Image (spheres, helix red, strand yellow):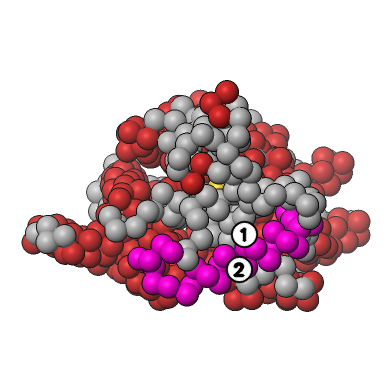
Amino acid sequence: MANVNKESRHLLISEVDHEINPGPLNIQFDSPDLRSKRPFYIEPTNIVNVNNAIQRVSDHASAMNKRIHYYSRLTAPADKALIAPDHVVPGPEECYVYSPLGSAYKLESYTEGYGKNSSLVTIFMIWNTMMGTSILSIPWGIKQAGFTTGMCVITLMGLLTLYCCYRVVKSRTMISSLDTTTWEFPDVCRYYFGSFGQWSSLLFSLVSLIGAMIVYWVLMSNFLFNTGEFIFNFIHHINDTDSVLSTNDSNPVICPSAKSGGHPDNSSMIIFYANDTGVQQFEKWWNKSKTVPFYLIGLLLPLLNFKSPSFFSKFNILGTISVLFLIFLVTLKAVHLGLHLEFHWFTPTEFFVPEIRFQFPQLTGVLTLAYFIHNCIITLLKNNKNQENNVRDLSVAYMLVTLTYLYIGVLVFASFPSPPLSKDCIEQNFLDNFPSSDILSFVARIFLLFQMMTVYPLLGYLARVQLLGHVFGDIYPSIFHVLVLNLIIVGAGVSMACFYPNIGGIIRYSGAACGLAFVFIYPSLIYIISLYQEERLTWPKLIFHIFIIILGLANLIVQFFM
């Protein structure tokens, strides 16, 4: 929404200033195309406004927008007589792109082909948006699949999701009867599948968002607990590695799951003595599963109820800093610990896992979400200055993401000290393999905790926009509606943090679910339908894309048997 502060202000800016004064979208206002006019409203879909737009839009502008949307529904989609004009898009200063497990990235301009971003900036935007919390579970996924199988799966899943993302980018160009320059992928789904496509895309988008918010709550509880434990142990000179299986050197690595039957340990690791009542009281009130997840409610629930989370969008750079620091931490740890590898293709040993394991679908589920950017890739590429380089830039970005995942996963797995610890000790969050007293891990947890606390309200806002906006036609119908939705989301996060704090499991389930629609089914089906309508569909193309759909279905179903 553009700034419409006064009732007397014109809704649309007339064509003035000509070539010497380009418009806010870097468009010349003397263009005969009506799309060159300045926008004032867009109904939120994948792009949302994070400014205080509700207070700044006049009643006149709001009423005009409602009339336009009403008129646009009176005729068939092919009839443009009463359809809202294409220039109804948000201002460039108000466009944000969200990744399910990543951060929100601000676009400097929006109009396709008139963006200011070079290819280098576009590639970095895609890389930055995809780099989410899934990166913490990549080493665990490699352990589940086996070292060799894991590297192959990461590479093949990168290629497969890249192709499906390419099909998403090209999906609009397959529609020749309508102007699709302002469309997003859900609009394409609605065109081909009607209301079912619209609501199903909304459902799967919410699955990815709520799944991300649950993972965030589990991780924030973990990081907050370890931060508090670090401070307490430092003050009281407690060595937290005495209570768990660990290496005895200057860079200790621990195995929390050793005392919990191989499952993620969700309890405190503080060792205390019977007479030390102070430590016992801390253990009682600072517990990873019983108290800390509830402490976050008082901190984050009020933030979710804000009408606009614009303040938190200022901290998006923390996501990049966190990933870069994780790369630095993993590199430094690998240098100190060295590499510990043995190759056994099918038979596990006491300290090493086989190269090929049948649990590899757990890694494919994690990677489906780790490579997920399909619901916002069109928006990101619209801002590319050189539209002819979109496919190349997308491919380079995916290659960099794949190399980042391989770098983190391979180094953590290879440097994990076996012996004395087994590779099976690698946790779903690899930071859990470092004690809370480890300085570098403490800094990484602080970075990630603060970053997640600023991104969490943005994800909650996007969930509110998508659900309440579609159901009630208003993203803030009342404080009651918003509070009920936020209580449900927060309740789900607290429940998972208390009873199922397995981020690898949550990521692979939500990733396989949302990826089924946005990654595998919709891009392939849309391509098949468009080729059939143009009478260009061949058997090899049909079989190949049906195979992709089957892979997506199998990826989801097999998660429930792992």
Where the C terminus falls, by quadrant?
A: bottom left
Foreground of the two, 504 or 370:
370
Identify the mark at residue 67; answer none if there is no mark: 2
Q: Is residue 28 visible?
A: yes
Identify the mark at residue 506; answer none if there is no mark: none
Q: Is residue 69 magenta?
A: yes
* Residue beneath the point at 69% across and 73% down: 485
Which numbered mark, 1 or 2, is in the foreground of this view?
Answer: 2
Looking at the picture, which amino acid does disc 2 mark?
Answer: Arg
Q: Could you say which quadrant of the image residue 538 lies in?
A: bottom left
Q: Could you say which quadrant of the image residue 530 lies in?
A: bottom left
Q: Is residue 503 magenta?
A: no
Foreground of the two, 159 or 111:
111
Q: Is residue 131 visible?
A: no
* Residue beneath the point at 49% across and 46% down: 35
Using a 10 Å C-alpha cutoff, classify the residue at mark 2 as few (fewer than 14 neighbours), some (14 to 19) or many (20 or more): few
Residues shaded magenta: 52-81
Identify the mark at residue 462; answer none if there is no mark: 1
Locate residue 329, reporting x and y percent. 58, 32
Who comes first in sequence, dot 1 or dot 2?
2
Structural distance between the alpha carbons of marks 1 and 2: 25 Å
Locate residue 401, reporting x and y percent. 42, 39
Residue, far top: 20
Using a 10 Å C-alpha cutoff, classify the residue at mark 1 as few (fewer than 14 neighbours), some (14 to 19) or many (20 or more): many
Locate residue 377, reporting x and y percent. 44, 47
Looking at the picture, which amino acid does disc 1 mark?
Answer: Leu
User: Can you say whether 511 is above or below 51 in the image?
Assistant: below
* Residue beneath the point at 29% across and 45% down: 159
Foreground of the two, 534 or 21:
21
Give SS at disc 1.
helix
* Residue beneath the point at 69% across and 59% down: 61
